[in-house]
Amino acid sequence: MQNKGSRGASRQVDYGAKGALAAASLSVPQMLNYAMQDEYLAQARYDRILENFGNVRTFLQIKEAELRHITALQTLFQRYGLPLPEDQSQSYTTTPDSLKSAYAAGVQGEIDNIAMYDRFLTFNLPQDVRIVFTQLRNASQNHLAAFERGLAR
């Protein structure tokens, strides 16, 4: 699915962290789908920022970390025999108009991501899923601090 323009922003409530936070109930496969969507979304956001503002170190480093997050989630999808969700993140991302807004978008993305994993961790989860969700949440807390430092500059 390609960019849907303005429709993407209104649909984001059903995708990634925003979808997970709005869901009335969650199963482990749904949590894994929302988590993967949110990692796809971060990748798309950082790709656009790097395309528009060049190789900004913070975004380059966090983009690399997000790739490791995707790999960790892919392992769980394989282990549980679940199909990977299609990457539709381009439909849900916009390009920030300044580096300051790029940092602000990074901050908000990580806040949503942390809230999503915090919600997931309130459920009774298989131990391997709990470990991955905890690691990804903790990494996002580090990313949030890096984006906040960038925003404060």
Image (spheres, rainbow, N blue to C red):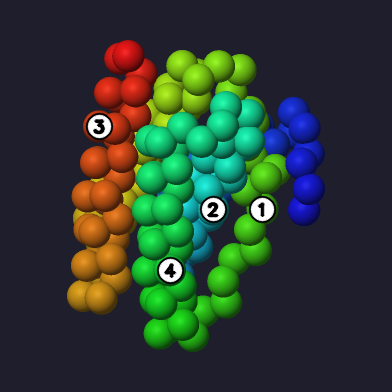
- Image coordinates for residue 107, horizontal then vertical, percent: 37, 29
Query: Marks 2 and 3: in contact by CB < 8 Å?
Result: no
Query: Marks 2 and 1: in contact by CB < 8 Å?
Result: yes
Q: In whole angstroms, how far apart are the C-alphas of marks 2 and 4? A: 11 Å
The quarter of the rendered structure image containing the C terminus is top left
Of the two numbered discs 3 and 2 in the rendering, the one whose residue sits closer to the viewer? 3
Q: Secondary structure at mark 1?
A: loop
Rate crowding at label 2 as few (under 14), some (14 to 19) or many (20 or more) other CA atoms within 10 Å.
many
Which mark is first along the chain, 2 or 3? 2
Residue of label 4: 71
Task: Please name the amino acid that badge 2 sits on.
Answer: Tyr
Which mark is first along the chain, 4 or 2? 2
Residue 52 — which label?
none
Residue 106: quadrant of the picture? top left
Residue 88 — which label?
1
Vertical placement of residue 15 versus 25, above or below? above
Q: At x 66% / y 53%, what residue is drawn?
A: 88
Task: Please name the amino acid that badge 4 sits on.
Answer: Thr
Q: In whole angstroms, how far apart are the C-alphas of marks 3 and 2? A: 20 Å
Q: Nearer the viewer, residue 128 or 67?
A: 67
Residue of label 2: 40
Vertical placement of residue 74 versus 9, above or below? below
- Image coordinates for residue 32, horizontal then vertical, percent: 43, 65
Rate crowding at label 1 as few (under 14), some (14 to 19) or many (20 or more) other CA atoms within 10 Å.
some
Q: Secondary structure at mark 2?
A: helix
Of the two numbered discs 1 and 4 in the rendering, the one whose residue sits closer to the viewer? 4
